[in-house]
Image (cartoon, rainbow, N blue to C red):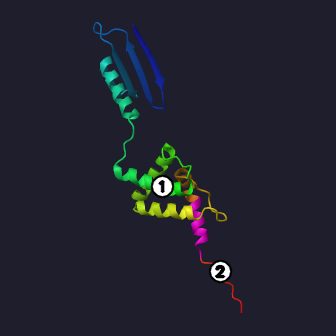
Amino acid sequence: MLKTSATTTRKTKAFRIEPTQVCGESMYDIIWQANGEEDAIAILVTKKDLLDLKKSIDELFNKPKVLDKLVSSQIKEIMTLFYHMNPSLNFANKTYRDSAEWMIDQAEKNGSGFEYIKKLTKAVIKIQGEEFAPSVSNPYEMKTKLFKIKQYFERNNKNKTKVYEG
């Protein structure tokens, strides 16, 4: 007995046919996709192949992320800068580490490099407590407030209008 189910999206129809028994004791999944009636794809896969594929996908997505030593040391350096200002900073916090890695990657893509992020981090730490400065105590806050930090530096680095007293 064949069990079928059909789902329809805008222009694509997808059918999944699950026979209970095909070719003796073997189990197969047959997936049929058709765009209109001209293009059709049928895939015949054994259950063992599907289990192997599922295992490979699980390994791919559940594998811990391994960073190269250079990026790892750069992240540690950014975290250390924040640690001097905020001693309760948790170096093992994944969100903080991912934020530091993201900022380093963006700087590399823009051609600025790690030194730019290091200088920016030192500048952000230096302005803490100043009037109208964005409050930042960890890499995640720095990442989420980059635009506000940029605005603050642009606003405060303009030439001040000098008043002539004569």
Q: What residue type is labelled 1?
A: Thr
Q: What element does badge 2 sit on?
A: loop
In the image, is residue 28 part of the stretch drawn in magenta?
Answer: no
Q: In this view, does 22 lie above or below 38?
A: above
Number of on-image labels = 2
Please state the horizontal and vertical placement of residue 110, each as a whole percent of the image: 42, 60
Q: Is residue 63 visible?
A: yes
Disc 1 or disc 2, which is closer to the eye? 1
The image quadrant where one finds the N terminus is: top left
Q: Do the residues labelled 1 and 2 touch (CB within 8 Å)?
A: no
Q: Name the residue under label 2.
A: 161
Q: Earlier in the sequence, mark 1 or mark 2?
A: 1
Q: What element does badge 1 sit on?
A: helix
Mark 2, residues whose alpha carbon is within 10 Å: few (<14), some, or many (≥20)? few
Give the label on residue 80, or none: 1
- At 41% from the left and 55% from the top, the residue drawn is 74
Point out the residue furthest to the right here.
166
Please state the horizontal and vertical placement of residue 20, each as a whole percent of the image: 37, 9
Give the label on residue 28, or none: none
- Nearest the viewer among 16 and 127 is 127
- Nearest the viewer among 99 and 6 is 99
- At 58% from the left and 72% from the top, the residue drawn is 157
Please state the horizontal and vertical placement of residue 133, each as a whole percent of the image: 63, 62
Residue 59 figure quarter: top left
Please state the horizontal and vertical placement of residue 63, each as a whole percent of the image: 38, 35
- Nearest the viewer among 150 and 10 is 150
Tell me which secondary structure the magenta stretch mostly adopts.
Answer: helix
Q: What residue type is labelled 2?
A: Thr
The image quadrant where one finds the C terminus is: bottom right
Mark 1, residues whose alpha carbon is within 10 Å: few (<14), some, or many (≥20)? some
- At 49% from the left and 49% from the top, the residue drawn is 99
Q: Give the range drawn in magenta.
A: 148-158
